Image (tube, rainbow, N blue to C red):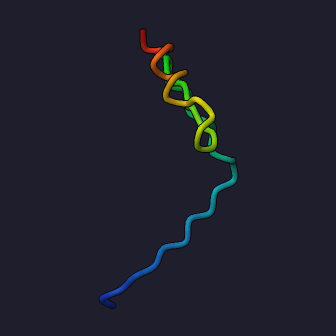
């Protein structure tokens, strides 16, 4: 048996997106108010 083995995985269906209740992603550039918005949402 070889020390390194590889495995090929063939998938016929695309992965389904996950849903996490109550999770909100806040993204944006510096200075756009992400922290302020997050603070307001957590209150």
Using the image, determine if residue 16 lies above or below residue 20: below
Q: Position of residue 25 (x, y in %)?
A: 56, 31
Q: Position of residue 17 (x, y in %)?
A: 62, 36
- Depth check: 20 or 26 in front? 26
The quadrant the N terminus occupies is bottom left
Residue drawn at point x = 43 percent, y = 14 percent: 42
- Depth check: 34 or 4 in front? 34
- Judged from this view, the residue extending furthest toward the bottom is 2
Using the image, determine if residue 2 lies above or below residue 29: below
Using the image, determine if residue 27 lies above or below residue 4: above
Residue drawn at point x = 40 percent, y = 82 percent: 5
Q: Position of residue 3 (x, y in %)?
A: 30, 88
- Depth check: 23 or 26 in front? 26
Residue drawn at point x = 55 percent, y = 72 percent: 8
Q: Position of residue 37 (x, y in %)?
A: 55, 21
Residue drawn at point x = 63 percent, y = 34 percent: 32
- Judged from this view, the residue extending furthest toward the top is 43
């Amino acid at each position: 048996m070889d020390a390194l083995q590889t495995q090929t995985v063939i998938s016929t269906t695309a992965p389904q997106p996950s849903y996490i209740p109550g999770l909100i992603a806040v993204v944006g550039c510096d200075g756009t108010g992400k922290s302020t918005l997050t603070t307001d949402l957590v209150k």
